[in-house]
Image: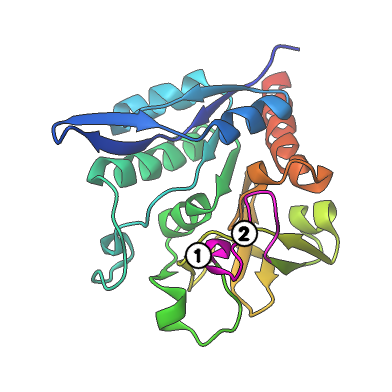
């Protein structure tokens, strides 16, 4: 069977004030390769090109990045650091295009938030400001800070979900976020919670999303299983 082509959403920076660069972390490319797929870097899209991309590729990874514009879920900006506007719109358009094409999607960190908002849910704009919790959700702020390959807290996984099948009742994860799902979209099944009750995983048919960064924890086979889930789902689609 041919290798599956997996789109990676772009992230954007401005260089020399008037030049934009699209990029993403090497770890995402390695992660897709480790799962047996071929990563394909995407740029920003329109609705028409999003559908063309979804037709050409087998699956999508919505990667980590900056916050989502709260206007997408009907709130004013209180604590959100925004990307370029077309980065938000591209993530949303690509998600909906792959859903229309009935092709699998994996969301990582920002990706779980994009999926929840695209499906009609809302977000906490800043965990320390909005919630009373003793759990640090950005391990760079820990004393001492924890490295990319280390874990920050445990998660509890809900029975009868894909994430429970992979991780069992509890497992440790890393953590690099200050926003999180507040109201989960009704169309999504919540499948993981952190120690303080923050939603860390959601899923629906051919969609799986986590708040942590499994691509940084590939020394743990359970985290590799997430990208294998995506590749296997793509292969099953391709075989039909």
Instruction: State yes or no: residue 205 in magenta.
Output: no
| Residue that label 2 marks | 202
The number of discs equals 2
* Residue 206 visible in this rendered orientation of the protein: no
Give x and y (percent) for residue 228. Answer: 75, 35
Q: Main secondary structure of the magenta part?
A: loop
Residue drawn at (13%, 32%) of the image:
18
Left or right of residue 12, residue 36 in this image: right
Give x and y (percent) for residue 193. Answer: 67, 70
Query: Does the CB distance between marks 1 and 2 fall below 8 Å?
Result: yes
Identify which residue, 35 or 54, lies in the foreground: 35
| Residue that label 1 marks | 185
Q: In the structure shown, which secondary structural element does the residue marked by tag 1 occupy?
A: loop
Query: Is 76 situated above or below 83?
Result: below
Identify which residue, 117 or 144, lies in the foreground: 144
- Residue sitting at the far top: 2
Residue drawn at (69%, 49%) of the image:
149
Mark 1 or mark 2, which has the lower sequence index? 1
Give x and y (percent) for residue 4. Answer: 65, 20
Q: Which residues are magenta?
A: 138-152
């Amino acid at each position: 069977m041919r290798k599956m082509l997996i789109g990676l959403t772009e992230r954007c920076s401005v260089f020399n004030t008037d030049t934009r660069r699209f990029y993403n972390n090497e770890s995402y490319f390695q992660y897709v390769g480790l799962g047996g797929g071929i990563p394909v870097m995407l740029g920003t899209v329109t609705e028409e090109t999003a559908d063309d991309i979804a037709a050409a590729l087998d699956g999508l990874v919505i990667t980590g990045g900056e916050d989502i514009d709260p206007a997408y879920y009907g709130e004013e900006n209180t604590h959100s650091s925004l990307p370029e506007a077309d980065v938000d719109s591209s993530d949303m358009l690509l998600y909906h295009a792959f859903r229309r094409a009935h092709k699998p999607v994996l969301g990582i960190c920002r990706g779980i938030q994009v999926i929840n908002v695209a499906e009609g849910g809302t977000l906490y704009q800043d965990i320390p400001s909005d919630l009373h919790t003793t759990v640090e959700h950005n391990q760079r702020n820990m004393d001492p800070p924890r490295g990319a390959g280390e874990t920050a807290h445990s998660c509890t996984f809900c029975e009868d979900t894909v994430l429970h099948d992979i991780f069992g009742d509890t497992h440790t994860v890393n953590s690099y976020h200050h926003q999180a799902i507040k109201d989960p979209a009704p169309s999504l099944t919540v499948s993981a919670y952190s120690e303080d009750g923050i939603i860390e995983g959601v899923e629906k048919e051919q969609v799986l999303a986590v708040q942590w960064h499994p691509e940084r924890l590939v020394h743990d086979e359970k985290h590799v299983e997430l990208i294998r889930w995506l590749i296997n789902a793509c292969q099953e689609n391709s075989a039909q």
